[in-house]
Image: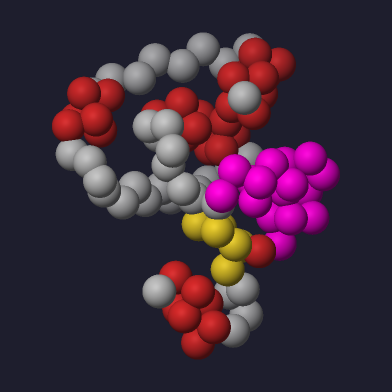
Amino acid sequence: IYGAVARWILGIKLVVQGEEHVKAHQPCIYTANHQSGIDMAVMQTVYPPNTVMIGKKEVIYIPIWGLLYFAFGNIGIDRSDKKNALAGLN
């Protein structure tokens, strides 16, 4: 929902090419080089349904977005404590 609304507000028209490659190789891990706040609105269009994201735990402090992020089963890690962050991923 966030991605569609954000793109509509910003007037971003998105064309996805090669989507068949994403769907052909499941399960898998996606990585993205996060460059700006627009990345979240764009990448959500590419990820298939039920994709879980891993991000920094501070995301919880972003109004509305933070609550939705964790409510949909995404994972927050504490990057200040490397040992616990790796344990959380395991």
Q: Residue at x 59, y 43 (%)?
A: 72
Tally of numbered tags: 0
In magenta stretch: residue 3: no
Q: Judge left or right: residue 45 versus residue 56.
A: left
Where does the image place residue 25, in percent across and percent down from the top left? 18, 39
Magenta residues, start to end: 58-73
Q: Quadrant of residue 24?
A: top left
Q: Residue at x 31, y 51 (%)?
A: 29
Is residue 82 in view from this perspective? no
Q: Quadrant of residue 68?
A: top right
Where does the image place residue 56, in percent across and percent down from the top left? 61, 62
Where does the image place residue 43, in percent across and percent down from the top left? 47, 34
Pick whichever, 4 or 72, lies toward us.
72
In magenta stretch: residue 65: yes
Pick whichever, 63 or 16, lies toward us.
63
Tell me the chief SS of the magenta region. Answer: helix
Q: How is the image coloured?
A: secondary structure
Q: Residue at x 71, y 62 (%)?
A: 58
Pick whichever, 35 or 41, lies toward us.
41
Q: Residue at x 59, y 84 (%)?
A: 81
Rendered position, 41 above or below 13: below
Q: Judge left or right: residue 27 versus residue 85.
A: left
Is residue 8 in view from this perspective? yes
Pick whichever, 32 or 22, lies toward us.
22
Where does the image place residue 7, in percent across and percent down from the top left? 61, 19
Rendered position, 89 above or below 64: below
